Image (cartoon, grey):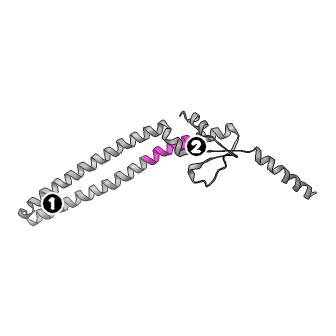
Amino acid sequence: MKKILFAALMLLAPLTMSAQKFGHFNSTELVPLMPEYTTAQTELQTLQKQYEDDLKRMQEELQKKSDEFEKEQANLLDNVRQRRQAELQDLYQRFQQSVQDNGQAFQKAQAEKMQAISEKILAAVKQLGDAGGYVYIMDTSAGIPYISTKLSTDVTPELKKALGI
């Protein structure tokens, strides 16, 4: 009896496999087409320009004070020279800290904007998967080595429609 049941299951397994739907899409193709991506890129460019301008101002101030100190240092008293050197060192350290802080803030802003885009794509994929009865919908840009285009449907056009592209 067990052998007959097992044989019946083995015969039905290919039928159930063929009834399952699989889909795939390429997010690197979708993301640049999204209006949110264009907006995010514009905002990030504005933020980067702001950071660059701030750092340029700080660098110019540091250079100006350094040049003044170079010209005057021979005529300064030791305690004044030491105080001015300490001020220059402090200004340089603040500049270096600003470079680091701005880089981290930019990366955080970039990650947040891309996360929002990724979440929108994921929601569209889930909705499409539920509506279309898909078992899996895979992102081919995620490093999947092979996807059979005969057994898997490219759902990119449907995702574009769902995302308003």
In the rendered image, residue 57 lying in the magenta stretch gets the answer: no
- Decide which of tag 2 and tag 1 comes sooner along the chain: 1
Q: What stretch is highlighted in magenta?
A: 110-122
Reading the image, the residue beneath label 2 is: 122
Q: Is mark 1 on a helix, strand or loop?
A: helix
The residue nearer to you, when weighing 26 against 85, is 26
- Badge 1 density bin: few <14, some 14–19, many ≥20, Cα 10 Å: some
Label annotation for residue 84: 1
Instruction: Reply above or below: 101 against 22.
Output: below
> Going by the image, does 7 lie left or right of 161?
right
Q: Which amino acid type is shown beneath numbered disc 1?
A: Arg
Quarter of the picture holding the N terminus: bottom right
Q: What element carries label 2?
A: helix
Question: Residue at the right extreme?
Answer: 1
At horizontal 15% and vertical 60% (from top left) the residue drawn is: 84
Count up the numbered dots: 2
- Badge 2 density bin: few <14, some 14–19, many ≥20, Cα 10 Å: few
Q: Position of residue 104 (x, y in %)?
A: 39, 53
Q: Is the magenta stretch mostly helix, strand or loop?
A: helix
Q: Which amino acid type is shown beneath numbered disc 2?
A: Leu
Select label 2 or label 1 by which is in front: 2
At horizontal 43% and vertical 47% (from top left) the residue drawn is: 110
